Image (spheres, rainbow, N blue to C red):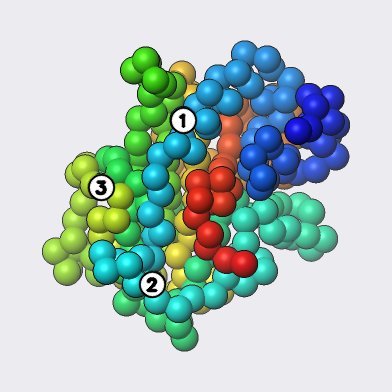
Amino acid sequence: MRTASIKYLSALLFPFILQAAEYPDMFTPSYYTEKTMKQQVDALVKMCQKAPFHHPLENSEGKRPEYRVPDMGKFGAGKGPTRKEQHHPAVDMHVGNRKTEVEVFAAHGGVVSTVRDAPKYRHYVAVKKVIKDDKGRVLGKLVTLYGHVDLDLNEADELSLDGQIVKAGDLISKHLYDETRGGPHLHFEIRYYRQDDQGDEGFYGFQQKIPGSGDWPWGRWDPVIGFGYGHPRNHSLVLYK
């Protein structure tokens, strides 16, 4: 078990931090300097990790297509000219040889929102789940985001889920976008929000000039709109070796 001082030192040295869990999550620097935030975050993440997760490419028969995760598409992979400017907060899954007819399934239950014309993602689906403690008190929310899907083709296939409630394993997309940089692939993210965070499941990774609590690989982090991304393996999701 790492001590608080070692964790804090790690926060100063690395763009993502090793948590008490086995794999690295990516949290805002304020997590390590604000005691109240850390307590709230720890309680929320602990409950989030209890929620059963479903593989986003696994169908109702337990079958998954063959896919690959390139090194640059792994969680925490360094990006930019020196591989230190940015770090990938998700997992990119490429199915087959530029295949676009790919079924995507909800990793957990919750409410669906769909977004078009989003910076970086173009189209994406998000699933939001309210997280409560053992006494029924709301701690915050867990959000999974499924980027680079094609909502227009989904709707042409009569799959339109905006505002709908889904269960883990429900079909939420049938198509990936054909012109995504690097080829068609599913960009899968896990995010956490405390109860009082004002942000939603909208993309927030590259807001460069917002005053915040500390430097972040994407600029200045604003702790009001959220505080971090979760590693899939901390939710028992093994997406690559």
* Three-letter residue code for mark 1: Met
Mark 1 → mark 2, Cα distance in angstroms: 27 Å
Q: Which residue is mark 3?
A: 167
Residue 226 shown left or right of residue 85 in the figure: left
| Secondary structure at numbered mark 3 | loop
| Of the image marks 1 and 2, the number of the one nearer the N terminus | 1
| Secondary structure at numbered mark 2 | loop
| Of the image marks 1 and 3, the number of the one nearer the N terminus | 1
| Crowd class of label 2 (few under 14; some 14 to 19; many from 20; radius 10 Å) | some
Residue 128 shown left or right of residue 165 in the figure: right
Q: Which residue is mark 1?
A: 47
Specify the quadrant of the image occupied by residue 141: top left
Furthest-front residue in view? 1
* Three-letter residue code for mark 3: Lys
Mark 1 → mark 3, Cα distance in angstroms: 18 Å
* Three-letter residue code for mark 2: Arg
Mark 3 → mark 2, Cα distance in angstroms: 18 Å
Q: Which residue is mark 2?
A: 64
| Secondary structure at numbered mark 1 | helix
The answer to whether residue 2 is seen in the rendering is: yes
The answer to whether residue 193 is seen in the rendering is: no
Residue 180 against residue 139 in the figure, above or below: below
Residue 40 rendering spot, x and y as whole percentages: 55, 19
**Which residue: 68% across, 37% down?**
19
Residue 75 against residue 211 in the figure, above or below: below
Residue 75 is labelled as: none
